[in-house]
């Protein structure tokens, strides 16, 4: 379909010849807000790597039917080398790096956008601080600014609430819902209850992918999720009771 911006087409992928994902297909459209859940080792991160083009699948392919798109990626903060000598502002600016250009020469409008993002995330006073001096939440916010600076068509977030400060977490989710008016979002999270309250659809990845065209957590979905979770919903607020894992 012409309104698909990114598509995994029967992808099988893994490492050293061992498949982690098997025959996975997923179509992403403008303004989609897809929550990706699944057990540890089920292939969520592998799927992201294939989508970003950093891992080549054994079989299948990634297509962009509407033409090349811009993808913003928020990795887990634990994947970042905090000893690297770079400031908060420089990390955000690096999101504007162009092909065959070592460091971007910022236009006035881009400098304003960097400042606005740092202000919105409460980081403007730390703009010249090295990333090694940041808390986990501050680093995560810095990486989010980097993912957004190029105004992506698709924003991919890998466990964004892992290190985010609690006083920013609620603000983050409100912001994501506003951003969804401008871009598609793929949100990977282990927090099933939290994402079900804001995403539009859910994809469960456990070697294979099962797509659910709503954010309703049914017993069938939880069975696929392969985690012993009971969900009790009161109004629009999901509650979770976790049995022993």
Image (spheres, grey):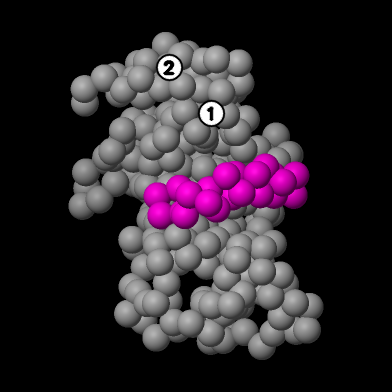
Viewer can see residue 72: yes
Viewer-nearest residue: 115 or 60: 115
Q: Is residue 163 magenta?
A: yes
Spot occupied by residue 48 in the image (x, y as percentages of width and height): 44, 49
Numbered tag placed on residue 231 in the rendering: 2
Q: Secondary structure at mark 2?
A: strand
Residue contact at pointers 2 and 1, CB within 8 angstroms = no
Image quadrant where one finds the C terminus: top left
Q: Secondary structure at mark 1?
A: helix
Q: Residue furthest top?
A: 219
Mark 2 or 1 closer to N-term?
1
Q: Is residue 42 left or right of residue 147?
A: left
Image label count:
2
Spot occupied by residue 27 in the image (x, y as percentages of width and height): 58, 36
Few, some or many C-alpha atoms within 10 Å of disc 1 (few <14, some 14-19, many ≥20)? many
Q: Residue furthest right?
A: 109
Few, some or many C-alpha atoms within 10 Å of disc 2 (few <14, some 14-19, many ≥20)? some
Q: Is residue 88 left or right of residue 50?
A: right
Name the quadrant containing residue 24: top left
- Residue located at (62% from left, 84% from top): 104
User: Compared to 244, does 126 lie above or below?
Assistant: below
- Residue located at (69% from left, 75% from top): 115
Viewer can see residue 12: no
- Residue located at (78% from left, 84% from top): 108
Name the quadrant containing residue 7: top right
Q: Which residues are magenta?
A: 161-184
The residue that label 1 is drawn on is 196
């Amino acid at each position: 379909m012409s309104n698909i911006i990114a598509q995994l087409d029967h992808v099988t992928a893994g490492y050293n010849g061992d498949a982690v994902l098997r025959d996975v297909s997923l179509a992403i459209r403008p303004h989609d807000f897809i929550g990706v859940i699944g057990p540890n080792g089920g292939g969520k991160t592998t799927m992201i790597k294939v989508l970003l083009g950093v891992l080549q699948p054994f079989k299948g392919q990634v297509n962009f039917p509407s033409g090349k798109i811009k993808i913003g990626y928020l990795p887990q903060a634990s994947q970042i080398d905090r000893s690297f000598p770079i400031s908060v502002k420089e990390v955000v600016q690096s999101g504007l790096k162009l092909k065959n250009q070592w460091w971007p020469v910022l236009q006035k409008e881009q400098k304003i956008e960097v400042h606005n993002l740092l202000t919105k995330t409460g980081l403007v006073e730390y703009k010249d601080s090295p990333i090694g001096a940041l808390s986990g939440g501050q680093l995560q916010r810095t990486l989010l600014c980097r993912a957004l600076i190029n105004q992506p068509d698709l924003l991919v977030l890998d466990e964004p609430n892992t290190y985010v400060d609690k006083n920013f977490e609620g603000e983050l989710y409100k912001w994501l819902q506003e951003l969804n008016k401008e871009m598609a979002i793929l949100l990977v999270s282990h927090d099933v209850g939290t994402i079900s309250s804001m995403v539009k659809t859910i994809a469960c990845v456990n070697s294979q992918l099962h797509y659910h065209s709503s954010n309703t957590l049914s017993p069938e979905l939880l069975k696929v999720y392969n985690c012993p979770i009971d969900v009790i919903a009161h109004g629009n607020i999901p509650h979770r009771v976790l049995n022993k894992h």
